Amino acid sequence: MDPAKSARGRDYTVWWFLSGAALVTVLFYRDFIFHADRLLYGSDMLFEGISLRRFYVDEILAGRGVPLWVPHVYGGMPFVAILPGPIFYPSTILYFLLPLSRAIGWTFVLHTFLNGAFGYFLGRSFRLRPASSVVCGASFLLAGYVTSHLFGGQDGRMFTMTLIPLALGLLNRGLERNEFRWFAGLAFVIAAQTFSAHVQMMYFSCLALAAFFLYHVAFRLPRPDSGEAVWRVYARPVAWFTLANVAAVLIAAPQFFPTLTVLEHVTRAAGERGYEFAASWALPPQELTAFFLPDLIGSLPGSYWGQNPIKLHTEYLGAVTIALAILGLSAGFGRSLDRDHRRVVWFLAGASFLGVLFALGAATPVHRIAYTLLPMMSSLRAPSMMLGPVTVFVALLAAYGWEAVLIRRAAGTDSDDGAEGNAAARRLSWPVLLLGGPILLLGAAAVLNPRGLANFALLSWYPDGWPRQPSAVSIDALRLNGLFLLVGFGLAWGAARGVARRRFGTWTLAVVLAFGIMDLWRVDQRYLRVQEADAALATDSVIETLHENVEPGERVWAPDRRLLERFLALSGGTDNYRPNQLAYYGVPSASGLQKFLLRPYARLVGGITPDARLLAAPVTRELLNVRYLIAPGALQDAESLLEAGGRHLYEFPSELPYAYFPASIEMVSDTSAAVARTLEISNPARLTIVEDRPDGEAPAAGQGSASLVRQEPDRVVLEVVADRAGLLAVSEIHHERWKAFLDGEEAVVWRVNTAFRGVEVPAGRHELVFEYRSLPFTFGVWVSLLTVVGLISSILIAWRRRPLRPEA
């Protein structure tokens, strides 16, 4: 009797599998889950992603709502619009229920479990047996390309990949059942992918969904009956798929609309254009071997000796997954599967092949064609991210491999004797030999002579004098790779043959998948690292001093050590704080690390890396109200306020206040002239540059004083005493969504000194208020809410009207 079934014949496979997936997840993350004082290490999360997440959580808990402006990086910039992280993603609710460092770790734990759950759902959505769906879920549960992003702490990328099988399963159910409720669910999933804030992986996921939709319409959709209009057959799925994508955009409007509208106001590095940029960080052809021998070229610092500058992940698919996927591909050329399933297999094989070619970047024409024809491709690099959808396709192929085994077992035709059995064996053998043969040969070479295999790869695949070499650790790991590869293939194929011929029970699958999960685990565990939270996030005396001494409106600058060593004499010390690390502690910084910069700020500091001009042009530091410098070592001929951990804190003397009335005003005709004249200024209090406006004359020079009364991310309040009417210059970055209100009446905001705000103030005492108002965000919230209500209503109506039918 099948242990997955009760005495009444009800199938409990899904519950057995979900329980097993939960157990595997808990054991995999045990060093984090059972130690409340630990966090999951992520190279990009600490201190880049976590800083903006903490700012977001602090603002929400302070009762100020979703912040639209973050003052802690680059002197200030839009917050929601720059994609700061998955701030609207469903699992972000954990940020408000747990300590932030723990909550971030638990989102990774949750999505690892969901990998398996959504993988199982994908298999069932394609009408595969429960056991075959378990293969899909187990193959995706700890899939190397998904799970290894733990090391970088790249949660948005991982979340988006986790949702791909759910999206594909919903799409297929909607197409097969011709019911809108599944397309409504698809809209929510695509919106969630958008809320993950990883635009590129979301885009690649949508390309994969669109490819499957087109394939279904072209090859799987039933042909119209005679006399039936052709357009009627195609109109409904096309309309519903289009509606699902439009609805997804509308649900994600609070994220999508601000980002879309800010693009015209931001800049990026000059090198981030053209095909060379788009093809960068592709999968090198030599590293195709990482699918089955992850340690041949290696990954992570100390073991990677390939073509890219660094590598912090693996593409490993798992020996069992590949072996069963090859059986699935073979079944596509046999008769075990029905015609529709064979067509799905052909799509999965073809899409996987094209996806891998795309991931290779400039090495094949596929990426160049996509770059030429598809929108947004010129703005995206790292074509290797297409391996996210490919990993899902391969997991589903593996499920089809086991499905074919169960069909042959049920049919009882796969016997040792008979012409039919021999013909079936011949049909299945050539794909197995063509794909599995070279993989097994490389696996055998890795076991018998790993050093020789690595040297062969080095001499054959890389030019003479290649500076990197395989390490001794990589050689030992490579031998183990080969051993697991041979055993995994032997176990999977042996079990498949034995189950199909009724020599083994179906329980054999549990043994095969247990080995497969162990295989993936041994590779993935190297990307899972934990740290003591207090040690990783602790402040030091420099940060504590800044908290005590930095006045509202003042900023701090922590330049990169390499820059200071080029221009200044440094002694001792260590690396400086990471670019966004000061923001984690709530210290406003004149620099930072974001993909985009507001153009006014970028013009002032000379590009996307501001440190060089901040060092070379003292006027930029004055205008940004930089009062403190943190140097990763002692500066000669300068006395530091204090030192902690090799970092020295210095104070910049400056007489320029946060807000001031300049003694004279000079108007220039264009932005270029404004930048040039701003950099020539020796004393901004004496001369301020304003840019010409079509609707006004140059403002007058006033006299008086201003004090900062209240400073919040989206609202700044000043008390101004003007002895003489004129322009008040404020050390706040200019952006068109900042509105000024003088005693409650809206006032014109001038752009002064290239990047800052100025307001004409009449004589007398006044209250000046700056408010950041984002119509795209406000409009997006209402659009999202109305769309969600409409979709939920349509799902409930469809659910009540659904015809009763047995589940696949």
Image (tube, rainbow, N blue to C red):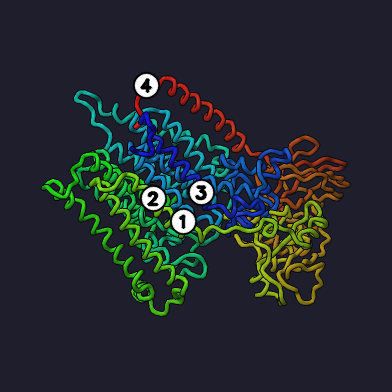
Q: Residue drawn at (77%, 41%), measured in percent from left and top? A: 769
Q: Which mark is residue 25?
A: 3
Residue 273: mark:
none
Are dots 3 and 4 in contact, CB under 8 Å?
Answer: no
Q: Quadrant of residue 618?
A: bottom right
**Image coordinates for residue 403, horizontal then vertical, percent:** 29, 43
Among numbered discs 2 and 4, the one appearing first in the sequence: 2
- For marks 3 and 1 on the same chain, the one whose residue lies earlier in the sequence: 3
623 relative to 113 in the view: left or right: right
448 up-or-down from 346: above or below = below
| Secondary structure found at label 1 | helix
SS type, badge 2: helix
Q: Nearer the viewer, mark 2 or mark 4?
A: 2
Of callouts 1 and 2, the N-terminal one: 2
Residue lying at 53% horizontally and 61% vertically, measured from the top left: 270
Q: Amino acid at mark 2?
A: Leu
* Viewer-proximal residue among 525 and 104: 525
Mark 1 vs 4, N-terminal side: 1
Q: Which mark is residue 521?
A: 1
Residue 417 in percent (x, y) is at 13, 49
- Residue 165 locus on image (x, y percent): 42, 43
